[in-house]
């Protein structure tokens, strides 16, 4: 039997069983209905039997609570005696003869009074007897020692639902976990009261969840006995929503006395002690009573049948919520609209399916929604294409579905049609990954009016090398208004348009809002994309640990929700950092699948990472081969955005392999984009100076202010200039440049590049930099020691009570400090380091 979130309680009961068998003990586990008392009694019984302890078990029952000695009789204990005292002595003698024995009494509150008195008598006399008495009760422990059983935590609740209901979407699990408040019975029973659609579709859950019979019995017993007037007020409060405020609460005193509700004396707000008490109040009311309350509260969709006008209003409400960044609430409106309007049902279901896949991260909901559609339309086609793209990562199938759907658009030139614009934005994503942009350009060209953001994306994202200053000015205008944007999808799309033209810094604040919103339950897909965009910005700014943390968080979310395509930018970012830091194993693990792509972004990702990896290892011929797979030398290939990011890489590879003409030609091609940004201007001039081995130009370029905004590119420029100065036999200036480069590389953790700078320093006759003091906390030393011994991150985390992810983050930060790139090198690093070389905080 799998019990979630009960490790501490299981340990306690195991110890109790062992101590009772060795001596004698009594204990009552106390807790609310459904909290898991019986399951823990089962665990204790199994443990006792495994240790050879005899187990006798009985459960109290309300119907037999008035029958003297009913419980003892069912336990097979002697009760045929003239007095209760004699019975008690007889029971104690019988149990002592059977010792070691464990007596388990469930639902102690329903045990008949005579049996309870005898058990209490025995419990006071079991020292050194080998008798254990273990009970479970809802209220007090009847004089026995007690331990209170709390609800399980949120993480354990989610794990329990995943185990028993693996097909349930994550957001539905979270809703059920919140409603159950950690009550295991509720977690197991709530899904059984839902329809298959509700269990698998985000937004289909009603405001008040239905209860199974077992839950109704467990939570309604105290409600049933309330006065009718009190129950009527409770129904109004239950259907009013969270923290209702009632005009008159005087009739709620009986419910307050029972602890069913709490009323804030200052605000007048009413809250139920448990969400399932609220659900029980609704369950106990008749359909007529519920409809009447809904009518009084103005809940028209709950009080009426099919209604085309109301369906239209709900659809408009849903679209407004999407624009304001509340897509989960929008799905609920769309599903209610689908129920109210048979004529637009397919469209509303498809819109809900699209939001589930492309926005909220509830990819498992879409198939159930789409299975109910019968018509073929642009909306349905977009939803199916989105499912293929995100859930399966099948770009080819998504393209086929979307292009077919676009042909069904009633007016393909209408630039105000929201569905059409979403479809074209999806087509841009598809085109980036398969490298086929013609359909996208055609679709955008037919729009009238042409939306500004789509026009910008068509230029700065699809083919940034040729975007031109006029388009950059238009993008800057859009960026200036980003602080007022509230739609996460729009913020992300603006940032995507800004990515390859070096304008991500202008998007930081807005992207951080998207990430924060996603962490708080907002659109998860937008949050993932925002994390990867912020990570790219952090990489350029030299904040590599932050970039890697963002990449890992986004990839974790992709894995949790099943996003296939969205994971690629995160894999690229993580692999790029690993390449710069010399972690070859991580590089290969991340880009192995990218090599299968013949073109498009994934192919450019793989080549970009391999170029940087090869340069760090001084494998310049390989670097040249991978660089020219992105773009030929001498020009920036069309629709190859990574050609802008690899100009300096390809120029260096050409210089190192003796292709000087190609190096000069490619450096000249970089002049086309120098006006795009200050960074491109700096990188372009460094590439020109490197291709021409121009000492004077390097000196001029490196004299500019603000270059530390791009520490990796700056360190590379210092390295290249230092090499030239060394060859000109200028050891002093060369040493200064190379020392600055080495220190900058080391701060970044770019170990291969730091090693290159140190090699040049030695060749220049300059004394190599002394190794820096390595500062490790005691926890870090433990982590490194265990990793050097061959333990996995999961095993280390189990020993040190850390998550595997935390262990991995520590190791990734420590590798550069210790001068290693793989786990296999940790043992030698520790041996070299010695106990006295590390400062332990």
Image (cartoon, rainbow, N blue to C red):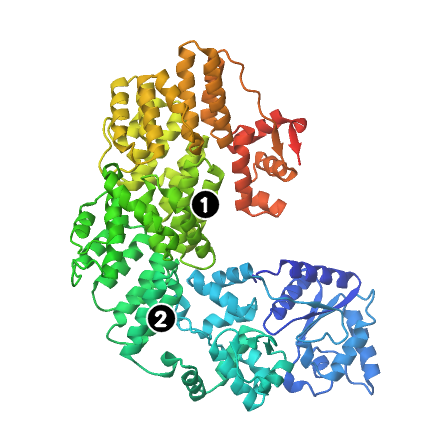
First in sequence: mark 1 or mark 2? 2
Please tell me whether mark 1 sits on a helix, a strand or a loop: helix
Above or below 353: residue 720: above
Q: Residue at x 58, y 27 (%)?
A: 829
For residue 692, what is the image quadrant? top left
Quarter where residue 402 is shown: bottom left
Residue 67 placement (x, y as % from top left): 70, 87
In the rendered image, the residue lying farthest to the top is 729
Q: Which residue is mark 1?
A: 550
Q: Is residue 717 left or right of residue 163?
A: left
Frontmost residue, 169 versus 75:
169
Residue toward you, 489 or 484: 484
Q: Position of residue 46 (x, y in %)?
A: 64, 64
Contact flag, marks 1 and 2 (Cβ < 8 Å)? no
Residue at mark 2: 333
Tell me the crowding category of disc 1: few under 14, some 14 to 19, or many 20 or more residues within 10 angstroms, Cα based: many
Along the horizontal axis of the image, is 829 left or right of 373?
Answer: right
Q: Position of residue 789 (x, y in %)?
A: 59, 35
Q: Residue at point 41% right, 56% down?
A: 524
Q: Is residue 371 left or right of residue 825?
A: left
Q: Residues within 10 Å of mark 2 (few under 14, many from 20)?
A: many
Q: CA distance from mark 1 to mark 2?
A: 33 Å
* Residue 196 position in % (x across, y down): 39, 70
Mark identifier at residue 383: none
| Residue shown at 46% from the left, 37% from the top | 544
């Amino acid at each position: 039997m799998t019990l979630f979130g009960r490790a501490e309680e299981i340990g306690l009961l195991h110890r109790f069983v062992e101590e009772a068998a060795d001596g004698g003990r009594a204990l009552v586990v106390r807790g609310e209905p459904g909290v898991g008392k019986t399951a823990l009694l089962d665990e204790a019984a199994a443990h006792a039997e495994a240790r050879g302890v005899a187990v006798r078990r009985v459960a109290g029952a309300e119907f037999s609570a008035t029958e003297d000695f009913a419980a003892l009789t069912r336990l097979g204990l002697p009760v045929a005696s003239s007095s209760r005292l004699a019975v008690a002595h007889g029971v104690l003698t019988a149990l002592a003869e059977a010792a070691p024995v464990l007596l388990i009494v469930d639902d102690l509150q329903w045990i008949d009074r005579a049996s309870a008195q005898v058990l209490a008598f025995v419990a006071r006399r079991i020292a050194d007897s080998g008798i254990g008495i273990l009970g479970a009760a809802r209220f007090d422990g009847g004089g026995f020692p007690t331990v209170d059983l709390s609800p399980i935590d949120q993480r354990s609740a989610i794990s329990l639902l995943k185990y028993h209901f693996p097909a349930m979407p994550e957001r539905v699990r979270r809703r059920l976990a919140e409603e159950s408040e950690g009550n295991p019975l509720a977690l197991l029973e709530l899904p059984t009261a839902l329809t298959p659609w509700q269990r698998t579709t985000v937004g289909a859950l009603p405001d008040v969840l239905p209860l199974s019979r077992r839950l109704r019995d467990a939570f309604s017993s105290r409600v049933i006995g309330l006065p009718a007037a009190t129950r009527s007020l409770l129904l109004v409060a239950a259907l009013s929503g969270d923290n209702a405020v009632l005009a008159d609460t005087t009739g709620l005193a009986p419910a307050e006395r029972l602890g069913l509700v709490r009323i804030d004396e200052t605000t007048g707000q009413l809250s139920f002690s448990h969400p399932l008490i609220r659900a029980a109040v609704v369950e106990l009311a008749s359909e007529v009573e519920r409809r009447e309350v809904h009518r009084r509260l103005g809940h028209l969709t709950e009080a009426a049948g099919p209604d085309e006008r109301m369906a239209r209003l709900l659809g408009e409400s849903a679209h407004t919520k999407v624009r304001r960044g509340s897509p989960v609430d929008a799905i609920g409106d769309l599903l209610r609209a689908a129920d109210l309007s048979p004529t637009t049902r397919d469209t509303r279901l498809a819109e809900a399916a699209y939001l589930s896949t492309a926005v909220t991260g509830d990819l498992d909901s879409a198939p159930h929604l789409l299975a109910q559609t019968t018509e073929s339309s642009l909306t349905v086609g977009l939803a199916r294409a989105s499912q293929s793209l995100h859930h399966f990562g099948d770009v080819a199938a998504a393209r086929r579905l979307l292009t077919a759907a676009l042909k069904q658009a009633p007016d393909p030139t209408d630039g105000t049609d929201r569905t059409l614009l979403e479809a074209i934005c999806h087509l841009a994503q598809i085109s980036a990954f398969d490298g086929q942009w013609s359909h996208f350009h055609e679709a955008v060209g037919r729009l009238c009016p042409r939306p500004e953001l789509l026009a910008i994306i068509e230029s700065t994202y699809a083919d940034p090398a040729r975007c031109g200053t006029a388009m950059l000015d238009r993008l800057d205008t859009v960026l200036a208004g980003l602080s007022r944007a509230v739609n996460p999808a729009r913020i992300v799309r603006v940032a995507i348009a800004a990515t390859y033209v070096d304008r991500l810094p202008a998007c930081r604040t807005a992207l951080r809002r998207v990430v924060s919103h996603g962490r708080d339950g907002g659109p998860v897909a937008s949050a993932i994309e925002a994390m990867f965009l912020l990570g790219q910005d952090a990489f350029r700014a030299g904040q590599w640990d932050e970039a890697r943390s963002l990449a890992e968080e986004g990839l974790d979310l992709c894995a949790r929700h099943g996003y296939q395509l969205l994971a690629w930018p995160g894999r690229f970012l993580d692999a790029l950092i690993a390449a710069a830091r010399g972690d070859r194993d991580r590089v290969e693990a991340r880009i192995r699948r990218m090599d299968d792509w013949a073109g498009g972004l994934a192919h450019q990702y793989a080549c970009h990472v391999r170029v940087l990896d090869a340069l760090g290892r001084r494998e310049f011929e390989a670097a040249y081969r991978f660089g020219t797979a992105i773009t030929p030398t001498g020009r920036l290939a069309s629709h190859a955005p990574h050609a802008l990011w690899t100009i300096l890489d390809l120029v260096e590879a050409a210089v190192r392999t003796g292709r000087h003409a190609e190096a000069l030609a490619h450096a000249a091609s970089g002049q086309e984009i120098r006006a795009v940004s200050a960074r491109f201007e700096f990188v372009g001039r460094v590439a020109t100076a490197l291709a021409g081995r121009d000492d004077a130009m390097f000196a001029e370029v490196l004299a500019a202010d603000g270059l530390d905004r791009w520490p990796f590119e700056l360190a590379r420029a210092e390295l290249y200039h230092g090499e030239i100065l060394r060859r000109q036999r200028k050891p002093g200036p060369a040493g200064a440049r190379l020392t600055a480069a080495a220190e900058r590389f080391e701060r970044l953790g770019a170990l291969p590049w730091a090693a290159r700078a140190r090699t040049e320093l030695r060749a220049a006759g300059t004394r190599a930099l002394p190794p820096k003091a390595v500062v490790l906390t005691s926890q870090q030393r433990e982590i490194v020691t265990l990793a050097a011994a061959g333990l996995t991150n999961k095993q280390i985390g189990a020993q040190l009570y850390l998550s595997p992810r935390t262990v991995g983050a520590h190791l990734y930060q420590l590798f550069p400090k210790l001068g290693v790139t793989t786990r296999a090198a940790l043992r030698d690093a520790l041996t070299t380091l010695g106990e006295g070389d590390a400062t332990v905080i």
